[in-house]
């Protein structure tokens, strides 16, 4: 992160109110988002509700009328995924 030079005390105070500057100055680690996008996607279309139910049974998925996406291999759902911090 590059700091720009400041000329006055007011500019310096304003600069230090920036939460990103405070985060950096506190020595906090940088955040790197991992790519969680799927590698490829396939759209399936079923001729009937029975065909869809058969597919669900064959793949061991519990498909409901609201199910729009399934992962292969199975990916368990994560609760509150947006409010987690993961450190490796």
Image (cartoon, rainbow, N blue to C red):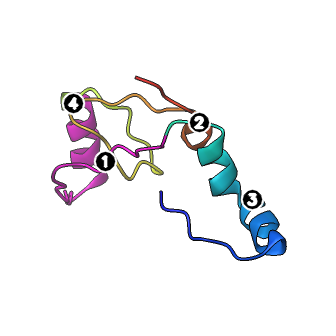
Query: Eyeballing the image, is 54 above or below 86?
Result: below
Relative horizontal placement of residue 26, taking residue 33 as reference (left or right): right
In this rendering, which labeled residue sits more in front, label 2 or label 1? Answer: 2
User: Label 4: how many residues lie within 10 Å, few (<14), some (14-19) or many (20+)?
Assistant: few
Label 4 to label 3: alpha-carbon separation? 47 Å
| Magenta stretch: includes residue 45 | yes
- What is the x, y in percent for residue 29? 51, 36
Residue bearing the label numbered 1: 35
Residue name at image x 45 percent, y 50 percent: 65
Instruction: Look at mark 4 in the image and give the residue it sits on.
Output: 73
Q: Kindly report the distance in space between the C-alpha atoms of the residues bearing marks 2 and 1.
A: 25 Å
The residue under label 2 is 27
Task: Please identify, in this view, whether the residue under mark 2 or under mark 4 is nearer the observer.
Answer: 2
Q: Quadrant of residue 60?
A: top left
Question: Magenta region: which residues?
Answer: 30-57
Q: Position of residue 81 (x, y in %)?
A: 54, 38
The secondary element bearing badge 4 is classed as: loop
């Amino acid at each position: 992160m590059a700091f720009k030079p400041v000329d006055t005390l007011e500019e310096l105070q304003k600069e230090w109110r920036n939460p990103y500057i405070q985060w950096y100055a506190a020595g906090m680690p940088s955040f790197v988002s991992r790519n969680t996008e799927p590698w490829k996607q396939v759209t399936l279309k079923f001729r009937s509700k029975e065909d869809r139910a058969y597919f669900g049974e064959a793949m061991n998925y519990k498909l409901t009328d609201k199910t729009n996406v399934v992962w292969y291999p199975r990916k368990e759902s994560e609760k509150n995924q947006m409010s987690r911090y993961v450190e490796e």
